[in-house]
Image: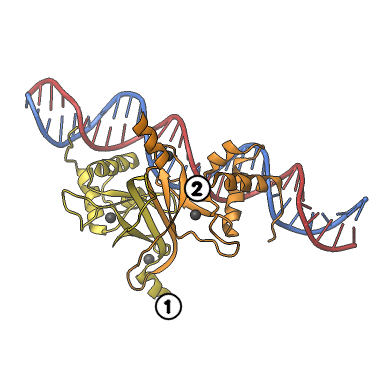
Chain colours: A orange, B yellow, C red, D blue
Amino acid sequence: MQRRKTPTKEAVLKILKDSGRAMSQEGIESEINIEINRATIYRILNRFCEDGLVHKIVAEDGKQYFALCLNCSEKKHRDNHFHFRCLSCQSIECLEEPVNFSVPAGYQVTSLNCVISGVCKDCYQHTRLS
Amino acid sequence: MQRRKTPTKEAVLKILKDSGRAMSQEGIESEINIEINRATIYRILNRFCEDGLVHKIVAEDGKQYFALCLNCSEKKHRDNHFHFRCLSCQSIECLEEPVNFSVPAGYQVTSLNCVISGVCKDCYQHTRLS
DNA sequence: TTATTAATGCGACTATGTTGCAATAATAAA
DNA sequence: TTTATTATTGCAACATAGTCGCATTAATAA
Ligand SMILES: [Mn+2]
Ligand SMILES: [Mn+2]
Ligand SMILES: [Zn+2]
Ligand SMILES: [Zn+2]
């Protein structure tokens, strides 16, 4: 099944690129400047995932967040890194740090979902100043 | 606010102990042998979390799973380890392996949610035999 | 035995995400 | 260019997970 170039698709991709963060459907919808249906955003994001263009992170709030990694090549998209979720500003970012781990013998690994929660640098500094 | 000893609470705790796994509300309800309301199970589990008796893991399916760590002492409950989710038998288990990581300077960490997905040993052997 | 209030059941509600279907529009074919 | 094909979209309905208010029940203290 081949993909078509549509304004909505382009718009969603641009939002993700510009933010440099992992975003939820809700976040994308509030940032986007065109009318776009909720279900459509999900479908676009899921297609991006299938195509290996973005990856999905499920945070502790149970929501799905989608991110486009800038340090990934066109051919190979990496999602084996930690993610940081700021409980203050709610942002989720991909960390450079790769996840190192081992599993018991005989276990097969297919994917990772590692999220570190806390307070990001900016938010922490704000609390110290006030 | 002090806690009371109730049959439901005891029953949920026993299920968690016996399974040795992380379980969802749904899983607990299906295993338990007494009548117990859905909301009540959640409340019991959340209270256990507050008391540091169990910890919550959010898996890639967006669901909450609750586990009682056997290698944790009464006083100090550790949840800084990886979890393994088998996509075949749906079980989630706490791995011994602790999560090693570092965050950018100025970032404050409060919690972790690290889940490795794949196929567990038992399920993998079954697929090889058949 | 009585009083206090934590815990429970029930129903209503919110939120997130998915799906069926008809309409639309991007792309290929004529 | 015109037409045909079918990927994409919007909309509504649905499914699922989890929370919350409130009246009732029952564990514990007095
Ligand atoms: Mn990433
Ligand atoms: Mn554990
Ligand atoms: Zn922040
Ligand atoms: Zn398994």
Quadrant of the picture in which ligand 2 is shown:
bottom left
Give x and y (percent) for residue B78: 24, 52
Give the residue number, with chain letter if any, for mark 1. Answer: B128
Number of other residues with Cα within 10 Å of mark 1, as a class: few under 14, some 14 to 19, many 20 or more: few
Which residue is found at the position 34% from the left and 50% from the top? B112
Q: Label 2 vs label 1: CA separation?
A: 35 Å
Give the residue number, with chain letter if any, for mark 2. Answer: A65
In this rendering, position of residue A47 left or right of residue B48: right
Image mark 2: chain: A
Q: Please, is residue A29 above or below residue D24 in the view?
A: below
Q: Is residue B92 visible?
A: no
Q: Is label 2's Cβ within 8 Å of ligand 1?
A: no
Element type where label 1 sits in the image: helix
Which residue is found at the position 31% from the left and 55% from the top? B22
Element type where label 2 sits in the image: strand
Verify CB contact (< 8 Å) between mark 2 and mark 1.
Answer: no
Which residue is found at the position 36% from the left and 51% from the top? B113
Give x and y (percent) for residue A50: 58, 59
In this rendering, position of residue A88 left or right of residue A77: left
Q: Is residue A67 visible?
A: yes
